Amino acid sequence: MITDSPRRSLSVAAVLGAALIWSSSFAVTKVALAEIPPMTLGALRFVLAALILGAVVHTGPERRRLPSARERLSIGLAGLLGITAYFALENVGVDLASASDATLIVASYPILTLVLSGRTAFSPVRLTGMLVAVAGVWLVVRGDGSHSLWGDVFLIAGGVAWAAYNILARRDGSGASPIVVTYYQTLAGAGGFVLLSLSEVDRWSVPSGANVLRIVFLAGLCSVAGFLLYNHGLRQLEASVAVNLLNIVPVAGLGWAVVLAGERLTPSQLLGGAVVIAGVTLGLHRRKDVASGADAAPEATTRCLSGQLCASPPCRPPSR
């Protein structure tokens, strides 16, 4: 069955909510990159996101339950993977690759997560669902014949970083709330981006008013709201399942194109979207014997599973 409890259903809804937010970030990032260098864009975005999260954490009740210095180092390492490494690679990949390449490669992230996780609690049905989702995204984007090898390489490398992040984040044993974990991950990721952005000093300029708004959008919604929703979902979902849900991103991205850009969908795109949704549904399937055993994390364990996706990507798959 797809969901075993209201708690799992809410986790699925949280990840889907993050996916819907992140689905808009590919276009926003692409436009901003025309004026702002990729590492600088990442620095501006995540420094602002860290400031927002820091204000929430240090003025609210969470300030009484902060992780220890050692736990912050572990959380920060996850942030360097899931924010600095992933989004740096994604920003460069989006800048170099076609939209179709980026969408298709992001759809392969669940397979990368499955391979790198080394977990055995995955049924053939679940693996089939992931492959079906990849095939659906191929149907969506197959009409675009443009290609950039280096952009593809950066996006694939980003997928490896994202998979590693998901696995590492699920091992967090601090017991801290998702917002605290997200804050320290974002703080570490922002620091990494600031260092990387120093290589682009000669390209710095004052961003336009429109790009300031884009940075605020990427930081406030795609980084803060999206990451919080995704972190909440990871508390009850396996890493590969959570990432598989992000295959909804390219489908939702088509919806944004229709609503915001007035584009028309082709029959192939509509069919591909339906196949992606079918693949995601199969990917959520769990056998009853597995759901009642190894695949069902006890409450004492799930309280410790607070990770992030998104992005820029972000996600994505995510371009959060």
Image (cartoon, rainbow, N blue to C red):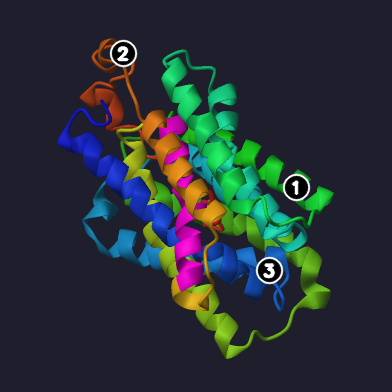
How far apart are labels 2 and 1 at the CA level? 36 Å
Q: Which mark is residue 152?
A: 1
Q: Which mark is residue 290?
A: 2
**Is residue 311 part of the magenta span, yes or no?**
no
Q: Which mark is residue 40?
A: 3
Please name the residue shown 33% across and 18% down the image.
295
**Amino acid type, residue under disc 3 in the picture:** Thr
Farthest residue to the front: give it: 267
Q: Residues within 10 Å of mark 1 (few under 14, many from 20)?
A: many
Callout 3 secondary element: helix
Label 2 near label 3: C-beta < 8 Å? no
Figure quadrant of residue 255: bottom left
Q: Earlier in the sequence, mark 3 or mark 2?
A: 3
x and y, in percent, of residue 210 in the image: 56, 86
x and y, in percent, of residue 81 in the image: 59, 43
Which stretch is magenta?
A: 239-258
**Amino acid type, residue under disc 2 in the picture:** Val
